[in-house]
Image (cartoon, rainbow, N blue to C red):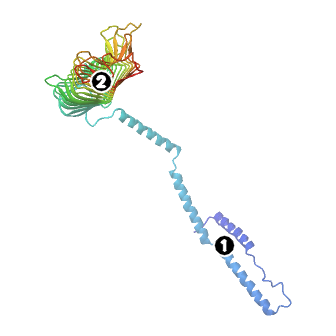
Amino acid sequence: MKHPFFMRVLLLSAASVFLLGSLSLVSMDDGGLADTVPTDNVWDISDRTFKKARANQLKLDIIESIIPTESTIDGIYSKLNVNQSKLDVIESIIPTESTVDSICSKIDVLDSKIDLIDVDCPCAATPIASPITITASGSYCLSKNITGVITIDADNVTIDLNRYAVVDGSNGIVINNNHADILIMNGTVGGGSSATQIGISVGSGCARTALKDLNVIDCELVAVDFGGINSAPIKSVNIDRCCIESSGMGLQMDNVQGGRVSQCSMSFNITGFYVDDTEKLIVEDCCSFANERAGFELRTSSNNHFENCKAIKNGETGSDNAFGFIATSGSCNTFVCCIAEDTSTNSISSSKMAAGFAFTGTEKRSVFVGCTSKRTQAVATGGSSQAKSFGVYLEAGTTQKCVVQDNLISGTTGDAGGVGCEADGSVHLIMRNIGYENDTNFGTSITNVHTGGLGVDSKALDNLSFPPL
């Protein structure tokens, strides 16, 4: 390979410098011939000369081996060419500023497309974009907010509201009578610019109706109405994680047989959860807050179970009766580990009351156990209320054979005096309750000693007043 002239000069110069440096390390001499020793004979001089010549020859061999040859220079140059080509490749793949800007621009475009998909997400089910009457089984979902009414007139229907709302209709979603296996979920009903009368209406004779992850709000009459009748009750209801707010009645059930309500909230209604002629409900972990009359109200209903439910600040804005939990003229209803807190009325009528927990009418064999009543009050402006206040109240003369056990009752006060626990009905058992900081901890009909068989009077056992009266 032929090399440019300047490269040859450069390489040969480097080799010369290298060689001169090497010669300074590998120097040759005359073998000591100039330093003849008089006593040496010819053989000694000859031997010494041979050894020095041999040593100098070895040094010359070393010098020759380290001088770069033309093939070595060719190899170095070849490697320089290879490395230069690699540098060219590296430089070609490093993005320039314009390339980076182009990539960023493309990312922005893709991001905007993703946002567009999120905002207007099509659903795999049959889309609904306007008011409709559904007459065929299947899965449906909203593709936008709907102004008007959706009516279900078929079995086996699922509607996914898809985070949209059904608003501004006379009703929101209506399930016609005698349909089964209906699921409505994941969105809002009500809350538009004009009044919705009933948010979700379930007709008589329906079975296996489920509501999940819904907001039902601003309905004039009822937010969620299960309207069964005696001849055609509604069966098997399942309601989970629903928020029912700012309506006439909140969640209302008439003639329902069997169901479960879990993790729902009912707030700012007249009554949060109203149950009539209904049986075999299980209600768990629900909260009824700031309703005008009652948090949870049962009438002529039996064998229902409420557990870990809370009624908070109910009745505050009304001048009528106020209740956290009340069951009237039913039987065998149980309330376990429930809380009624800040139940109050400002009525001035002596016929009105505020009660954290109450059994009234002909309620019988029902139970409050492990519950807590806090701060129940009947107080009017100026201190003129004659209404009564009770932490736990069992109506005189009519309620029968109910149990009030292991409850904590405190802070029951009123202008006319407040009673922690009053049980004036027939054959009740009042057992192991604690009353403290009430105007009166236990009513006069309750003694703290069990004196014999139940007979016809209410009996008390191991109740504790703190501080003692």
Quadrant location of residue 136?
Answer: top left
| Numbered label attached to residue 450 | 2
**Which residue matches tag 1?**
67
Q: What is the total number of numbered labels drawn onto the structure image?
A: 2
> Are the residues at dot 1 and dot 2 in contact (C-beta closer than 8 Å)?
no
Report x, y in % for residue 155. Answer: 17, 32
| Numbered label attached to residue 445 | none
Between marks 1 and 2 in the image, the one whose residue lies nearer the viewer? 2
Report x, y in % for residue 294. Answer: 31, 18
Q: Amino acid at mark 1?
A: Ile
Front residue of 334/316: it is 334
| Whole-number angstrom distance, CA of label 1 to CA of label 2 | 121 Å
**Which label's residue is closer to the chain start, 1 or 2?**
1
Residue visible at 49% across and 44% down? 99
Residue visible at 58% across and 62% down? 80
Query: Which SS class for mark 2?
Result: loop
Residue visible at 57% across and 64% down? 79
Front residue of 261/164: it is 261
Which quadrant is home to the C terminus?
top left
Of all residues, the one furthest to the left in this rendering is 231
Quadrant location of residue 299?
Answer: top left
